[in-house]
Image (cartoon, helix red, strand yellow):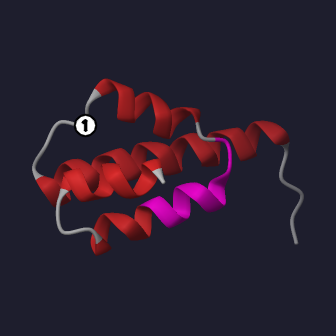
Amino acid sequence: MPYVTSVERVARREERAEMLILALERQYHVSVPEEIAVRIRGTTDVAVLGRWFELVFEAKSFEEFQQRIQS
């Protein structure tokens, strides 16, 4: 497995966060509210970002997505 620097890890996490925001906007045809975007960008656990990304396609609405990430 290749060595990944901390800078590369941060860049990957930031990339995943931006992809999640884009997926939300495309899936639900909304502008992601700033408080949700800040929460997504502030999440350091890539596993959580991955679960939220999957949730984009499971939730029936943006409101359901918001409720489920709160719990």
Q: Vertically, is 22 above or below 54?
A: above
User: Which residue of the protein is positioned furthest toward the front in this rendering?
Assistant: 71
What is the chief secondary structure element of the magenta stretch? helix
Q: Which residue is mark 1?
A: 32
The mark total stands at 1
From the viewer's perspective, is residue 36 above or below residue 28?
above
Q: Position of residue 3 (x, y in %)?
A: 89, 58
The x and y percentages for residue 43 are 60, 40
Judge whether 63 appears above or below 2 on screen. above
Question: Can you give x and y, in whole percent of width and height, for residue 5 in the image?
Answer: 85, 44
Q: Which residue is situated farthest in the left direction here?
A: 29
Residue 15 painted magenta? no
Q: Quadrant of the N terminus?
A: bottom right
Tell me which amino acid carries mark 1: Val
Q: Position of residue 22 (x, y in %)?
A: 29, 48
Taking the image as shown, residue 12 lies to the left or right of residue 31, namely right
Element class at badge 1: loop
Q: Is residue 2 above or below residue 33?
A: below
The range drawn in magenta is 44-52
Q: Is residue 53 left or right of residue 2?
A: left
| Residue at x 48%, y 34% (from the top left corner) | 39
Identify the image quadrant of residue 60: bottom left
Q: Residue at x 34, y 52 (%)?
A: 67
- Which of 9/43 is in front? 43
Q: Residue at x 67, y 42 (%)?
A: 44
In depth, the one of 57 and 26 nearer the eye is 57
Q: Residue at x 45, y 60 (%)?
A: 52
| In this picture, residue 28 sits left or right of residue 15 | left
Local packing at callout 1 (Cα closer than 10 Å; few below 14, some 14-19, many 20+) is some
Q: Nearer the viewer, residue 34 or 16?
A: 34
